[in-house]
Image (tube, helix red, strand yellow):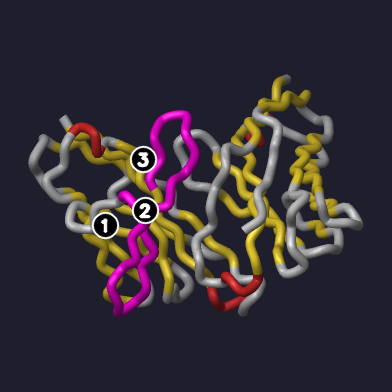
Amino acid sequence: GAVVSQHPSRVICKSGTSVKIECRSLDFQATTMFWYRQFPKKSLMLMATSNEGSKATYEQGVEKDKFLINHASLTLSTLTVTSAHPEDSSFYICSARDSRQGWPADTQYFGPGTRLTVL
Amino acid sequence: DAKTTQPPSMDCAEGRAANLPCNHSTISGNEYVYWYRQIHSQGPQYIIHGLKNNETNEMASLIITEDRKSSTLILPHATLRDTAVYYCIVRAVNQAGTALIFGKGTTLSVSS
């Protein structure tokens, strides 16, 4: 099956620092990856869509200068939370679209998530 | 994408079948039904998807009504590890490459 990894799984940082989260598709190429954020006892909220080799598309209300997304290869996308503050503390989850199956049955596979705590 | 409605919570005894309903009365002909689940503090896990025929895989069965306005996810023999939030999502075929949008889902609690 398709596997997506995230690193780190958990990070604690001081307010004002930047944190980078990596998302990798391990056994398939992902031209499109997605980043979500999830607050406690809430559902997943889409933050942005990342296409390999092009700029990410951000959802309304998501600050693109604060949440920098880079999708430099077909297996790696990174999310950098710049100048993190306590309100950025959340569970960040990436997913990758497995296009090998072919449209319309392509499926999104999710990483295990990264828990960010900003002190 | 069509809107889905799911009960907020359900309980199931271990070893029994868990039947999770989803209403999608405004579904269009080109929209698939997807089911994912999220176990606490993990990323969502793909379960199954279908268009109009019933589907079965090693994890579950998906029963879609003939008018496609509702569906039921069936876990035939629920275990404690099936305790999770289950999401029913509808997405059009021409939106391949777009993100899945999650609603509130159903919290399934399996107890011994």
Q: Position of residue A110 (x, y in %)?
A: 48, 55
**Residue labelled with disc 1:** A79
Between disc 3 and disc 2, whose residue precedes? 2
Q: Residues within 10 Å of mark 1 (few under 14, many from 20)?
A: many
Q: Chain of mark 3?
A: A
Residue A110 vs B17, above or below: the answer is below
At mark 3, the secondary structure is: strand
Is A41 within the magenta? Answer: yes
Provide the residue span drawn in magenta. Answer: A37-61
**Residue labelled with disc 3:** A91
Contact between marks 1 and 2 (CB within 8 A): the answer is yes
Contact between marks 3 and 1 (CB within 8 A): the answer is no
CA–CA distance in space, label 3 to label 2: 12 Å
Q: Chain of mark 2?
A: A
Q: Chain of mark 1?
A: A
**Residue labelled with disc 2:** A47
